[in-house]
Image: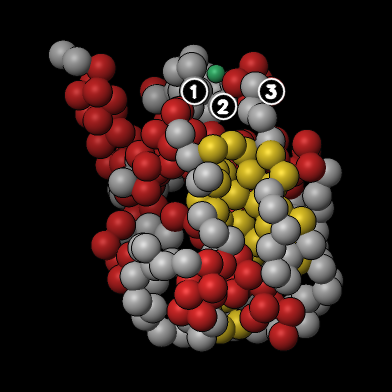
Amino acid sequence: MVWATKQARLNSHQKVICQLARRGSPGLKSTSTKSVQNLISTIFPPQCLRCNRLEYALCLDCRRSIGVQRGDQLAGVAAVFSAGDYSGWLRDAVLAYKSGRQSNVDGLASVLLQVLEVSQLSADYLVGIPSTKAKVESRGFDTIGNLCSALSRKTKIRHVRALKFAHRVTSQVGLTRDQRLQNLNQAFCATRAISGNVLLVDDVITTGATMSAAAQKLRIAGAKNIFAISLCRTQ
Ligand SMILES: [Zn+2]
């Protein structure tokens, strides 16, 4: 059996156990959530996103190999950092996650943790760039929301869902930075008032127009300083 097929089968089995645990299946009802998590990690140990070493979602060697980059200045954002270019293992890990391999979330959150440690950024709140309702429904999970929750568990920075899509935007593909900003200007709305410093999180930064549009809404909602991090950025 090829490795990819084995991995797909493992992911499928892991997903079923997670679903049973969430639903409170009779067989798992008396078992605490932590015990279930321990059982899952014993049967399906995490595997490093980059080198496939077992036991670590992202091993320390691979984490330290990440070349964190400071991005160009973005309107409304005090500083922006990414873990790397949209290529190689990082691109593969992001694509697999967005395609349904939810087990990648812990490793990807470790990638963002490395970005925070190298950049020395901190904040009062984590806010993810929201996905459209249609995307969340079609994927079956909220990619950036879940990533923020995992990062919040590692950093203890509070994750708040302070933004949502106000309405559908036309495709961003092929648009210039100014056109993207105009397109996105009314796309987001704040769901609550916010104060202090905010760390915006996204998977991939392209022109940065999405981050700037989101930062603008958070500023109006009361945020003081807004920083941004992403897993990747395109050139
Ligand atoms: Zn590794």
Q: Residue furthest left?
A: 1
Picture disc at residue 58: 2
Q: Is mark 2 within 8 Å of ligand 1?
A: yes
On the image, which quarter does residue 45 sit in? top left
* Distance between mark 2 and mark 3 Cα atoms: 10 Å
- Identify the secondary structure beneath mark 3: helix
Three-letter code for the amino acid on which mark 2 is drawn: Leu
Q: Are marks 2 and 3 in contact (CB under 8 Å)?
A: no
**Residue 74: where, in percent of width, then height?**
69, 63
Q: Is mark 1 within 8 Å of ligand 1?
A: yes
Q: Look at mark 1 in the image and give the residue it sits on.
A: 50
Three-letter code for the amino acid on which mark 3 is drawn: Arg
- Identify the secondary structure beneath mark 2: loop
Picture disc at residue 64: 3
Residue at 58% from the left image edge and 61% from the top image edge: 208
**Residue 96: where, in percent of width, then height?**
35, 39
* Distance between mark 3 and mark 1 Cα atoms: 12 Å
